[in-house]
Every structure is written in C-alpha cells, then in structure tokens.
Amino acid sequence: MENFPIALPTDDIRNHAALAVDRLIDIRRQVAEAGRMLHDWYAFEFEIDRPSRLLADPYSISIDQFLSEVKSGRGRSKPPSAAGVQVAREEYFRTIQPAQRLFHGANQLEWRLYDLVNETYGLTPDDVRLMWDTPPPPRRPLAQEHAAETETAA
C-alpha cells in the first residue's frame, strides 16, 4: 500500500466533492432527525414503542407498506381506527415522502462523488466495468444500498 499511487484531484473536482459531501452530511442529519421524530410519533400516536425495521427506517417503502406496518405494530387487538389510518397517511406524506426525496438526492450526490473519484484517477469506462466485475465490487452509494437492504427485509 505504501507504493500505491494516490491521485490528487484538481481544484475543480475538490470543490465539487466538498459541496457534495457537505450536502450529504446535511441530508443525513435531516433524515436522522425525521427518524427521531417518527419514533416519538409512533409511540405517542399509535402506542408503538418498538417499531418494526421498516417503520424505523421507512424511507423506501410505499404508503401501503407503511400503513400495513403501522397496523402490524399496533397488534391485532388494537387496530388503528379510520381516523388513525388517515393520521398515518398524512404523516407519511408530511415526513416520509420528503425524506424519500432526500434519499434520492443523496443517491445522485454519491454517484457524482463516485464519478469524481473515477475522473481523478483517470479511469476509463473499461476500467470502471472491470472494477465492478472483479470481486469485491465497489461499495454502492448509500441510498442504493439502503433500498437493497430494505427490499431484502420486506
């Protein structure tokens, strides 16, 4: 590793990367805050003290999946009322859907960072293809990993 060349980015690449990283940090902070608020909301509104994995991290699920998870979290003996379902639906669109858009933006930023690193190292499309085809493949952007993990859990 001592002899492995470390490519130095141009000022332009460094500036673009810094902006992307700052935005990613801000997105992660916003999503974490939304998660804390949702956890409190589940407990207060629906008496769900231990949300399922999908409720704890609902940023890639549909409204139907969300409502199903809320219903499951309440248990068979206390299903949500029609008003409770409406409250959950409104909260999905108020909190979860905007966070899903943030995740999409994070995914685009991470792919941009990925491209900037490839550009810094002067990788050709053939080099990138070889990198993806050779185990272990590079880490995927976080939003894409998150979606894959959530699909696996569902």
Image (cartoon, helix red, strand yellow):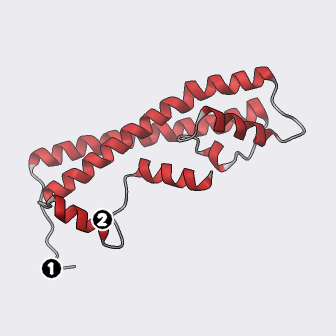
Judged from the image, the secondary structure of the residue bearing numbered disc 1 is: loop
Q: Secondary structure beneath disc 2? A: helix
- Pinpoint residue 135: horizontal percent, then vertical percent: 35, 73
Where residue 47 appears, as percent x and y from the top left, is 79, 36
Mark 1 / mark 2, whichever is N-terminal:
1
Query: Residue at horizontal 63%, vertical 51%?
Result: 154
Inter-mark Cα distance, 1 to 2: 23 Å
Q: Residue at position x 75%, y 43% from top?
A: 49
The structure residue drawn at horizontal position 53% and vertical position 40%, both measured from the top left corner, is: 59
State whether residue 93 is above or below residue 55: above
- Residue 100 spot, x, y in % from top left: 48, 36
- Label 2 neighbourhood size at 10 Å, few (<14), some (14-19), many (20+)? few
Q: Quadrant of residue 62?
A: top right
For residue 121, side relative to residue 83 (left or right): left
What residue occupies the far left of the structure in this picture?
A: 10
Residue sitting at x 74%, y 26%: 85
Within 10 angstroms of label 1, few (less than 14), some, or many (20 or more) residues?
A: few
Residue type (three-letter) at the residue carrying disc 2? Trp
Mark number, residue 3: 1
The residue furthest bottom is: 2
Name the residue carrying label 2.
132
Residue nearest the observer in this picture, 11 or 66:
66
| Percent position of residue 54, x then y | 63, 46
Query: From the image, which quarter does the N terminus lie in?
Result: bottom left
Amino acid marked by disc 1? Asn
Asked if the residue at tag 2 contacts the one at tag 1, i.e. Cβ–Cβ closer than 8 Å, the answer is no
Q: Nearer the viewer, mark 1 or mark 2?
A: 2
Q: Is residue 8 above or below residue 86?
A: below
**Is residue 95 or residue 86 the one in the foreground?**
86
